[in-house]
Image (tube, rainbow, N blue to C red):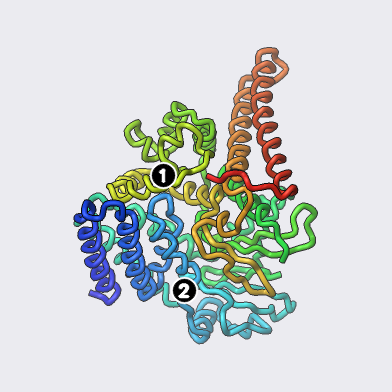
């Protein structure tokens, strides 16, 4: 067995023993049980982090995925894995030079006037060097794949598949094979930088038409399978950054473009600018290797699901949870809690109500009472595209990743913690982002109704006109309500009043 497999198996043995001992003595701890369980989570997460760092390659990528799964994993696990978003291996300059010769037929000096030997950033699959083009002197960022991946990825994928299969064999309630299956499907896309260049240009073209969203996609100069060359051409309002990120990813979910499926903190930067009228910052989105197109009907059902959640319409929630993810009546309470991070009773009353300390304790305790195992089983049955949407939705509502602020040509990590809203100390918390989500959902449903009317004939027909005006009035009521509340939040910020109670 390779050293990679040995590390993984030893870790599993220690972790399973830690959880067994802790859970078997739950009754002995009384009121101290939440802190005891939290300590167990932290020990196992730290142990796993060390193994992922030592194994490197796609194990780093796996940890990055897990760090974003706070709708599934305990807080101790997701926060522990956050350093993996920046703590990645660096390939030597010599190995990059050999790859350039192999892939382009020319050395690095044949393409660039200058090329910084040390990368400005490294991820699990690639690293980025600053350079200037030989012919034009244009400043560019050169993304190069780690050369060793071509040799090791097949083995790493096989080992990941074996690891999850072994975990399922001994702990059937923790079936994470869907995650290894997803990686086997998505990694070939992420390792094709020519495809990433196409995705970047597609997204750039789409958002160029939406001027009130300050998203920047660098121009693609040229790209091959393992090399991508892109243009590299602080008083910032934290609430506006949070809201703009929410708009970017809601636009990807509900708009007419593809969904960026890897929105962790290492792939987002904030850059100050004076060129925009409404905002004094740009949002820079990196790593366009993994995109998915969401079917139109799924977008519409997903929009109706969230409108039902926001309206506390339990019947509607159940209906559209089944349409979106095949969630049965018995599974629904768990699913509703998973996508909102709230106790089911709160979901059926008001999801944007303040979360009490008691509710937080009850959810934490439920994790130790088998809820985590049930979540793993449930999400293993959910379509993969829904998991990717939920990951992005978690970012757009709670912005639960760190992000970067571009400074003097370098990106630096601003706040490596679970919730961007909390660490940015945004005054609105997730409330405003729920409003943005509701606006996109309402718009999606209204457009579906307009399309239905058009299929039935001209809007000049009395019956169609009446139905259209009714749908338009309903849509405008929602828009007006949301606009008034956003103005109310803006007034409170300008008046320096206390923030609205956060969920």
Whichever of callouts 2 and 1 sits on the residue coming sooner in the sequence is: 2
Please give left or right for residue 304 compared with residue 207 in the image: left
Residue 22 image point, x, y percent: 24, 59
Q: Residue at x 48, y 43 (%)?
A: 355
Q: Could you say where residue 71 lies in the image, as x and y percent from the top left?
A: 42, 50
- Residue shown at the point (63%, 22%) measured from the top left: 453
CA separation in Å, label 2 and label 1:
39 Å
Name the residue rendered at 52%, 42% in the picture.
354
Residue 471 visible in the snapshot = yes
Q: Determine the image quadrant of residue 449.
A: top right
Q: Quadrant of the N terminus?
A: bottom left
Select label 2 or label 1 by which is in front. Answer: 1
Q: Are marks 2 and 1 in contact (CB under 8 Å)?
A: no
The total number of labels drawn is 2
Secondary element under disc 2, as helix, strand or loop, is: loop
In the rendered image, which residue does mark 1 sit on? 358
Q: Is residue 185 above or below residue 11?
A: above
Position above or below: 254 against 216: above
Residue on which the image places disc 2? 88
Mark 1 burial class by Cα count in 10 Å: few <14, some 14-19, many 20+: few
349 vs 330, left or right, is: right
In this rendering, position of residue 44 left or right of residue 443 = left
């Amino acid at each position: 067995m390779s050293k990679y497999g040995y590390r993984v198996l030893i870790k599993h043995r220690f972790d399973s023993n830690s959880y067994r001992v802790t859970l078997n003595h739950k009754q002995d701890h009384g009121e101290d049980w939440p802190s005891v369980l939290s300590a167990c989570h932290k020990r196992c997460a730290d142990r796993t982090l060390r193994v992922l760092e030592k194994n490197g390659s796609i194990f780093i990528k796996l940890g990055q995925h897990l760090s974003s799964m706070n709708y599934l994993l305990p807080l101790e696990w997701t926060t522990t894995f956050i350093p993996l978003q920046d703590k990645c291996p660096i390939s030597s300059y010599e190995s990059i030079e050999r790859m350039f010769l192999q892939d382009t037929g020319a050395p690095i000096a044949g393409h660039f006037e200058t090329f910084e030997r040390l990368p400005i950033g490294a991820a699990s699959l690639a690293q980025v060097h600053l350079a200037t083009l030989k012919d034009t002197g244009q400043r560019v960022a050169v993304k190069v794949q780690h050369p060793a991946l071509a040799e090791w990825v097949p083995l790493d994928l096989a080992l990941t598949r074996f690891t999850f299969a072994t975990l399922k064999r001994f702990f059937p309630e923790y079936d994470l094979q869907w995650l290894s299956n997803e990686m086997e499907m998505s990694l070939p896309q992420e390792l094709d930088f020519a495809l990433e260049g196409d995705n970047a240009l597609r997204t750039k073209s789409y958002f160029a038409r939406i001027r009130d969203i300050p998203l920047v996609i660098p121009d693609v100069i040229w790209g091959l399978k393992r090399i991508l060359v892109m243009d590299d051409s602080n008083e910032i309002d934290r609430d506006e950054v949070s809201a703009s990120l929410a708009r970017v990813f809601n636009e990807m979910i509900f708009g007419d473009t593809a969904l960026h499926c890897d929105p962790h903190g290492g792939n987002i930067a904030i850059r100050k600018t004076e060129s925009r009228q409404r905002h004094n910052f740009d949002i820079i989105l990196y790593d366009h290797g993994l995109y998915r197109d969401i079917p139109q009907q799924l977008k519409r059902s997903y929009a109706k699901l969230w409108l039902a959640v926001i309206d506390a319409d339990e019947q509607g929630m159940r209906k559209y949870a089944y349409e979106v993810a095949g969630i049965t009546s018995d599974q629904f309470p768990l699913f509703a809690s998973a996508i909102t991070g709230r106790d089911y009773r709160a979901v059926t009353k008001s999801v944007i109500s303040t979360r009490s300390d008691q509710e937080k304790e009850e959810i934490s305790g439920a994790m130790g009472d088998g809820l985590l195992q049930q979540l793993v089983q449930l999400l293993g049955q959910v379509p993969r595209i829904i998991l990717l949407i939920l990951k992005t939705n978690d970012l757009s509502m709670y912005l639960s990743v760190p992000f970067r602020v571009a400074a003097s040509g370098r990106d630096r990590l601003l706040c490596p913690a679970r919730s961007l809203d909390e660490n940015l100390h945004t005054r609105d918390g997730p409330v405003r982002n729920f409003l943005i989500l509701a606006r996109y959902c309402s718009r999606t449903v209204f457009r579906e109704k307009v399309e239905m009317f058009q299929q039935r004939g001209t809007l000049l027909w009395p019956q169609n006109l009446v139905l259209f005006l009714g749908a338009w009035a309903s849509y405008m009521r929602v828009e007006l309500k949301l606009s008034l509340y956003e103005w109310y939040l803006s007034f409170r910020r300008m008046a320096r009043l206390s923030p609205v109670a956060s969920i």
